[in-house]
Image (cartoon, helix red, strand yellow):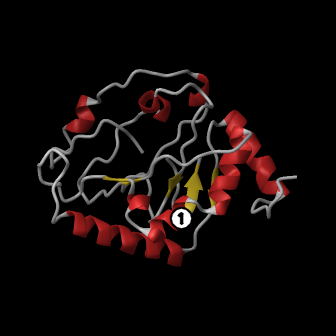
């Protein structure tokens, strides 16, 4: 039907549809540990290279600032940005062709809070089901070290306001400021949509 090789099994498609409808997100295995290592090494190289440059406004880059659009700076990252299984899942869920518009790499050293709780639709300004986000877990993470959290059913709540958690910010020893959040994965290579 799709006119090209399918990377999804029928069982995966059924699980994806169920998850999407009832949870509001789905997670599937995508990359091997070796592929994750390859991406992490490339992102670390890009992060270090950026240290010798300045932001558009002339200020210095922070050592751990997020990296916008790494796929534009690396053929390797671009390859994974356009991974055929990512495209297939996104098109399957969205019901048509999709276009990748941005990529981000977030670096979270020990002691930093990471992203604040948020809904991606809040920042995109798009309506429900007008945009899709995918997040790839590139290393082991859990509740203790900074996992991404997806809240089941939150897709039915509409766009909610962002609330600052003052108690959480007290645990921020490096005064890291972030307008956003993090999803659930505990091993190399899964991707959440």
Q: Which of 88 and 12 lies nearest the eye of the viewer?
A: 88
**Residue at (18, 64) in percent of width and height:** 51
**Residue at (69, 44) in percent of width and height:** 97
Question: Seen in the image, is 44 located left or right of residue 189?
Answer: left
Does residue 49 lie above or below 124 as drawn?
below
Question: Seen in the image, is 184 located left or right of residue 112?
Answer: right
Q: Which of 113 and 191 lies nearest the eye of the viewer?
A: 191
Q: Position of residue 143 (x, y in %)?
A: 42, 51
Q: How many marks?
A: 1
Q: Which residue position holds label 1?
A: 80
Quarter-of-image position of residue 87? bottom right
Q: Is residue 188 visible?
A: no
Q: Position of residue 70 (x, y in %)?
A: 39, 59
Q: Position of residue 167 (x, y in %)?
A: 24, 33
Circle 1: element type: helix
Q: Is residue 44 visible?
A: yes
**Residue at (65, 47) in percent of width and height:** 90
Q: Which of 170 and 134 lies nearest the eye of the viewer?
A: 134
User: Which residue is outermost to the right?
Assistant: 1
Question: Seen in the image, is 25 located left or right of residue 75?
Answer: right
Q: Which of 20 and 165 lies nearest the eye of the viewer?
A: 20
User: Which residue is outermost to the left?
Assistant: 59
**Residue at (35, 54) in percent of width and height:** 106
Q: Residues within 10 Å of mark 1 (few under 14, many from 20)?
A: some
Q: Position of residue 26 (x, y in %)?
A: 64, 47
């Amino acid at each position: 039907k799709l006119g090209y090789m399918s990377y999804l099994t029928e069982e995966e498609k059924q699980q994806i549809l169920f998850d999407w409808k009832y949870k509001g997100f789905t997670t599937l295995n995508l990359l091997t540990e070796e592929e994750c290592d390859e991406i992490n090494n490339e992102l670390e190289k890009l992060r270090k290279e950026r240290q010798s440059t300045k932001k558009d406004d002339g200020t210095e880059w922070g050592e751990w600032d997020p990296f916008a659009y790494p796929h534009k700076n690396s053929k390797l990252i671009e390859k994974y940005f356009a991974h055929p299984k990512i495209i297939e899942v996104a098109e399957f869920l969205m019901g048509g062709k999709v276009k990748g518009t941005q990529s981000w790499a977030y670096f979270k050293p020990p002691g930093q809070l990471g992203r604040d709780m948020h809904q991606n639709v809040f920042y995109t300004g798009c309506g429900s089901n007008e945009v899709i986000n995918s997040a790839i877990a590139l290393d082991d993470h859990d509740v203790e070290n900074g996992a991404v959290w997806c809240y089941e059913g939150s897709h039915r709540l509409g766009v909610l306001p962002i609330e600052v958690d003052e108690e959480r910010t007290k645990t921020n020893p490096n005064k890291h400021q972030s307008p956003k959040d993090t999803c659930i994965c505990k091993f190399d290579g899964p991707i959440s949509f």
